[in-house]
Amino acid sequence: MAGNMARLPLEPFVGATILEHETKLILDTTSDLEQGNGVLRSTMSALHWLNEHWQAETVSSWVEEVSRQKGRIVLSGMGKSGLIAQKISSTFVSTGSPSLFMHPAEALHGDLGMVIPGDSVLLLSNSGESEEILRILPRLSRLGIPMAAITSNSTSSLGQIVRWCFSYQLPDGEGCPIDMAPMASTTMQLIWGDILAACMMRRKGFTVERFAELHPGGSLGLKLLKIKDLMHSSFSIIKPSASLLETLQAISDGKLGMVAVLDGCELKGVISDGDIRRSLEQAQIKGINPLQLMASDILSGHSPYTIGLDRLAAEAACLMESHKITFLVVLDSDKPCGVIHIHDLLNAKVI
């Protein structure tokens, strides 16, 4: 029976037709340049508003309270605000403030157990009326959790409940062609997160050294490696009176292609394979028996290149490259304590 039914002509889907019309209208009336400038204008106007109206006292109060807490900074937000919350949480963690992200929808089904006394909560909602966010507030209040919010509406339900409200406004809208997709608002949330993270870093006295400890891998960690992390603390040493054969033996034993010449604790210089070759050439030219050469005769005229124990490995790389050398003597309070070789930097991928 179904096979005998007449086929009816398919009418175009009305909704799709309207969408195609609106899309064509946008493309016809707005160039990419104009639209891009519109996004920038919206973001800059929102940033200008924040620059004029943000309250340092509110930030200081929040930083003071969170610094006293023994727990974590718990971030939460729905949709795009949730993605921004994850980024802010990551920034806190990488700059010395323990943090985690809690999805508000999952929080309503058990994940509220992630929040414990001693934690503080930072909630993100552009409107300040996100249902999932509002539904977790009573439980957080009963736990006595300090709550703050980043929102465009300080008079919203969320803005009125939290203790600290970090607000922003969008004088020229989102910058979206249909003014619906979050654009300028998410940028402002990111900026607020960076403000709070930067102030926490200052309050904690967060240092480059601590940053390096938290970033042992990747290019950031490599750039922050210190000389003491890579140097050879065991290296060959001879006196200025050492013979040529003793000098050669010390270079071979050290396996670094060099030997340090010390008079007591004072560094007189270094002797490399190249210095040996040049001294032998000069001895032949002058008719001197090379076996009579001492370390003091082989030393080059210039002072040895050195670097401090606590300097960055990247600085050693710059020194080696600029002076076209392959090693540096490491000093601790002006006393030789090690050697760093270009191979150490290469193996650590500093260069």
Image (cartoon, rainbow, N blue to C red):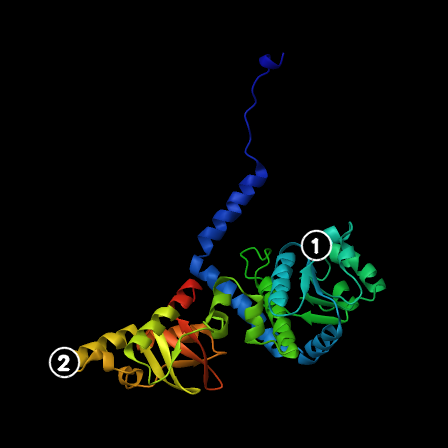
Q: Which mark is residue 11?
A: none
Task: From the viewer's perspective, tell me whether residue 29 is left or right of residue 127.
Answer: left
Identify residue type, mark 2. Answer: Ile
* Vertical position of residue 21 compared to residue 103: above or below: above
The outermost residue toward the right is 142
Residue at 65% across, 74% down: 200
Identify residue type, mark 1. Answer: His
> Which residue lies under the disc numbered 2?
285
Residues tagged 2 and 1 counted as in contact (Cβ below 8 A): no
The x and y percentages for residue 259 are 36, 76
Q: Which of marks 2 and 1 is nearer the N terminus?
A: 1
215 vs 87, nearest the viewer? 215
- The quadrant holding residue 248 is bottom left
Residue at 50% across, 48% down: 23
- The quadrant holding residue 272 is bottom left
The x and y percentages for residue 337 are 47, 79
Image quadrant for the N terminus?
A: top right
**CA neighbours of label 1 inside 10 A, class few (<14), some (14 to 19), many (20+):** many
Image quadrant for the C terminus?
A: bottom left
Q: Residue 103 carries which label?
A: 1
Secondary structure found at label 1: loop
* Vertical position of residue 142 compared to residue 304: above or below: above
Task: From the viewer's perspective, tell me whether residue 120 is left or right of residue 211.
Answer: right
Residue at 61% across, 76% down: 206
The x and y percentages for residue 117 are 80, 65
Is residue 156 something that shows in the picture? no
**CA neighbours of label 2 inside 10 A, class few (<14), some (14 to 19), many (20+):** few
Q: Closer to the observer: label 2 or label 1?
A: 2
The x and y percentages for residue 90 are 61, 63
Secondary structure found at label 2: helix
* Vertical position of residue 46 compared to residue 103: above or below: below
Task: From the viewer's perspective, tell me whether residue 206 is left or right of residue 285.
Answer: right
